[in-house]
Image (spheres, coloured by chain):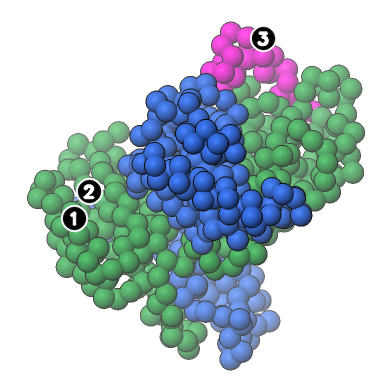
Chain colours: A green, B blue
Amino acid sequence: MPNSRAPTRSVFYISDGTGITAETLGQSLLTQFEGLPTRATRMPFVDSVDKAHACVLRINAAHQADQVRPIVFNTLVNVDISQVIHGADALVLDLFQTFIKPLEKELGLKSTHTMGRSHSATKNQQEYTNRIEAINFSLAHDDGQTDKNLAEADVILIGVSRSGKTPTSLYLALTFGLRCANYPLIPEDFERNALPATLAPFRAKLFGLTIEPKRLAEIRNERRPNSKYASIENCRHEVHAAEALMRREGIRWLSSTTKSIEEIATTVMQEIKLERRVF
Amino acid sequence: MPNSRAPTRSVFYISDGTGITAETLGQSLLTQFEGLPTRATRMPFVDSVDKAHACVLRINAAHQADQVRPIVFNTLVNVDISQVIHGADALVLDLFQTFIKPLEKELGLKSTHTMGRSHSATKNQQEYTNRIEAINFSLAHDDGQTDKNLAEADVILIGVSRSGKTPTSLYLALTFGLRCANYPLIPEDFERNALPATLAPFRAKLFGLTIEPKRLAEIRNERRPNSKYASIENCRHEVHAAEALMRREGIRWLSSTTKSIEEIATTVMQEIKLERRVF
């Protein structure tokens, strides 16, 4: 709910790279001011003094329009470019320079001041290839499409249809370079009362996702309205059967109901003891 | 290359949430010290004083083992929990508390000190549904699988096979909630010397990816060694034909050769003027 006393603030995320780091921390900080109305702009690839001057013009124009100072989060590595931004009529929070000094002191090293390093492919070609391979693996092994090369999986997610397996698999692959297969638990598994036979050798890699039947019915109804598949009775039956199966087989699981993809992925990595393959 | 003078440093990323924010900025800072050997550990969901004490034990043990102080990046929101971490034998950099005070002063508001808000699904259910729908859309429209509902796409990537379309599509969907279709440019398109007819109505949404033929041949050879598909001659032919086609049709494009997925996605958003749909 908007905080009625607070005017809308323009927020700028400025970086010499993608600006994703500035945006991630800046958003995290702003979520602490509930109901603050903001208008956010990411300004990536600001890698010259000229581009910085262009940013300052936009920031100052926002100040004029809003009648309150904009807030600027920046991760600029180059001190000259950063200086230009500090000349804007805004609260400028320097997410990078603030910490580089204490780090230099602690490490007894000088920073290289190389721009745009954090999300750059040139850092490590092999690591980048690993990431692409993880994405290909996870796509090929989405929704139990194939049993091939399951031994190469870092983790195999199981759960009923629409419990969050696919987004979690893709996130683990894209962000961490992990090879993530996923298998739906289907009525045949519940009747047989056992895991799919192909998964048995990989018990240590299995992780289950479950979900509250009410939320599952909502999600399924968006795709297939008024179907038996989406009915609350069927969702309740499938979820209970899946949880009973996982409990009996001793498989770790979590409920995805109120969790974000990032939270699910982080918990999976913690439980299966997986380390990221890309940085 | 490891810096031979520098001892290996243990690095800890600590958060009451996933720790992704701490890790993103911490890694970005550490890339500025080229060749510094580090051993990184992410400690997520540290949401109690007891868990913080357990972290301190691990940090202090690392100090003993390394004989140099560990570096701790934390985004802890709760001041009591953060205090415990500051008692560790380490350089503790407080990515969150450092900026919350100047923000409170500027905004004239008190922060809510709510933990784990930045990657939490409970923030906004509708936004979360948008994200899942974007993932489903991008998966269904991967590699030109269907022409259905192309009008609903935010962007349509085109390019030769293995130019980076699929990872970029999935990243745009997962991270920004954007509906991203992708279409391969194939020999038939080059012979006809025109875009696929189904794409013609959506020219404003088209964005091209190209890649250096040498790098493309490397990537293709990993999948189909010694094939005509992967040969340098064929790669050179396809890339030149694709670039000629895009130039003639007036389609914006970039070379993915030395770019990360994040850099490609950010450039696409900038060029097509797309705003993120999830936060």
Q: Is residue B277 left or right of residue A180?
A: left
Kindly identify the residue that appears in the image at 29 percent across and 46 percent down.
A40
**What residue does disc 1 label?**
A59
**What residue does disc 3 label?**
A228
Mark 2 vs mark 3: which is more N-terminal? 2
Which chain is disc 2 placed on? Answer: A
Q: Is residue B26 left or right of residue A61?
A: right
Report which quarter residue A190 is drawn in. Answer: top right
Judging from the image, what secondary structure is the residue with disc 3 in? loop
Which numbered dot is residue A10?
2
Q: Disc 1 or disc 2, which is closer to the eye?
A: 1
Q: Disc 1 or disc 3, which is closer to the eye?
A: 1
Same chain for marks 1 and 3? yes
Specify the quadrant that holds the C terminus of chain B: top left
- Point out residue B139 in the picture as x, y percentages from the top left corner: 58, 33
Q: Rounded to the nearest whole Å, what is the CA distance between mark 1 and mark 3?
A: 54 Å
Is residue A119 shown above or below A232?
below
Which chain is disc 3 placed on? Answer: A
Mark 1 vs mark 3: which is more N-terminal? 1
- CB atoms at circles 2 and 3 under 8 Å apart? no
Q: Is disc 2 surrounded by few (<14), some (14 to 19) or many (20+) residues within 10 Å?
A: many
Q: Is disc 3 surrounded by few (<14), some (14 to 19) or many (20+) residues within 10 Å?
A: few
Q: Amino acid at mark 3?
A: Lys
Is residue B264 shown above or below A78?
above
Residues drawn in magenta: A217-244
Is A221 contained in the magenta span? yes
Question: Looking at the image, can residue A265 be seen?
Answer: no
Mark 1 vs mark 2: which is more N-terminal? 2
Q: Is residue B194 left or right of residue A43?
A: right
Judging from the image, what secondary structure is the residue with disc 2 in? strand
Q: Amino acid at mark 2?
A: Ser
